[in-house]
DNA sequence: TGACGATCGATGCAAATGCATCTATATAGA
DNA sequence: TCTATATAGATGCATTTGCATCGATCGTCA
């Protein structure tokens, strides 16, 4: 646990598992969405944040902070969401550069349908494999790997 | 932990952390490689497997099994590695469809230089943040999320 | 041996990503 | 006020990914 330039075997193993398992789980969840002809996970992430934000909406840069997507990625994702009618872009009064993104009714509906599938994936892939105690332990350990440490 | 269609709050939280942390860590590791003008992580994964396989090399489909990359992805990645002289493709005697991929000296050297950076990232991002005991706990919990359960 | 389905690996094409840069507005400082 | 710098968001271009499919060989079974 001390600052070193060479990782310990335990660190390498944990890293390898983290990489492998997270890729597997993402792939499974994406496949489940595809099988239901639903949009990819990235759309869910954005719709979820916007749904939580409510009628006030969010600025694109706030979405970037919350979702960790790159700026150009959000810009294009929002364009797709808008052209699908899932979000709307509103001019914001006090900043001529920006806009506010608000989820539409159709967007909420899409999010709801995605959650039916996505939530089931989470339940199956994670909830069914670890007890709530173990899940809490896992969350706590992962929490200590966040950057920055808070967030 | 029972089979359910709706995930528990603990499952949702663990999932969210897993998604977020793994993305952050990958991004950090990729950035470190870029900052050293080294190839991306995917190259490391392949070179690592090939280095472990030794002079016998590996068939592309074996790389697919080990790395979880898609078939077309491996096919193109190997083409890039070959054109960079990091691997060589050998005709295999007993299967006219296939080929054997072997890492070259240059490939080993590249892998070594990548590990100097990648290993340091692992040490900093994971090894420096959790004790070996906690790392083992983390590995064990993640191990129970693998698909299939073994592997 | 001949036919048929399975496996190995490559590839054309469309979509998504990454990078750098651009425009426009906002803010700070002389 | 005028200029310089920073921030918000979009976009052109090259690379990579994803999907479907293809050509070639293998293995099986009649």
Image (cartoon, coloured by chain):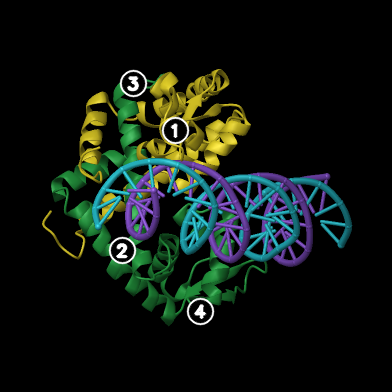
Chain colours: A green, B yellow, C purple, D cyan
Q: Assess whether mark 2 and mark 3 are in contact (beta carbons under 8 angstroms).
A: no
Looking at the rendered image, the disc whose residue lies closer to the viewer, 3 or 2, is 2
Q: Is residue B113 visible in the rendered structure shown here?
A: yes
Q: Mark 3 points at which residue?
A: A8
Disc number for residue B45: 1
Distance between the Cα atoms at labels 3 and 2?
A: 35 Å
Distance between the Cα atoms at labels 4 and 1?
A: 40 Å
Residue in view at x 44 percent, y 60 percent: A42
Circle 4 SS class: loop
Residue in view at x 42 percent, y 63 percent: A40
Q: Name the residue under label 2.
A: A118
Looking at the rendered image, the disc whose residue lies closer to the viewer, 2 or 1, is 1
Q: Name the residue under label 4.
A: A85
Q: Which chain carries label 1?
A: B
Instruction: Rate crowding at label 1 as few (under 14), some (14 to 19) or many (20 or more) other CA atoms within 10 Å.
Output: some
Instruction: Rate crowding at label 4 as few (under 14), some (14 to 19) or many (20 or more) other CA atoms within 10 Å.
Output: some
């Amino acid at each position: 646990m001390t600052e070193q330039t060479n990782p310990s075997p335990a660190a390498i193993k944990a890293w390898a598992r983290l990489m492998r398992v997270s890729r597997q789980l993402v792939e499974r969840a994406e496949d489940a969405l595809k099988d239901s002809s639903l949009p990819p996970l990235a759309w869910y992430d954005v719709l979820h944040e916007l749904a939580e934000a409510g009628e006030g909406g969010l600025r694109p840069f706030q979405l970037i902070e919350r979702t960790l997507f790159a700026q150009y990625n959000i810009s294009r994702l929002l364009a797709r969401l808008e052209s699908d009618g899932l979000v709307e872009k509103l001019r914001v009064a006090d900043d001529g550069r920006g806009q506010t993104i608000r989820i539409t009714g159709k967007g909420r509906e899409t999010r709801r349908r995605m959650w039916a599938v996505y939530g089931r994936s989470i339940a199956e892939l994670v909830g069914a494999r670890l007890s709530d105690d173990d899940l809490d332990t896992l969350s706590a350990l992962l929490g200590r790997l966040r950057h920055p440490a808070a967030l």
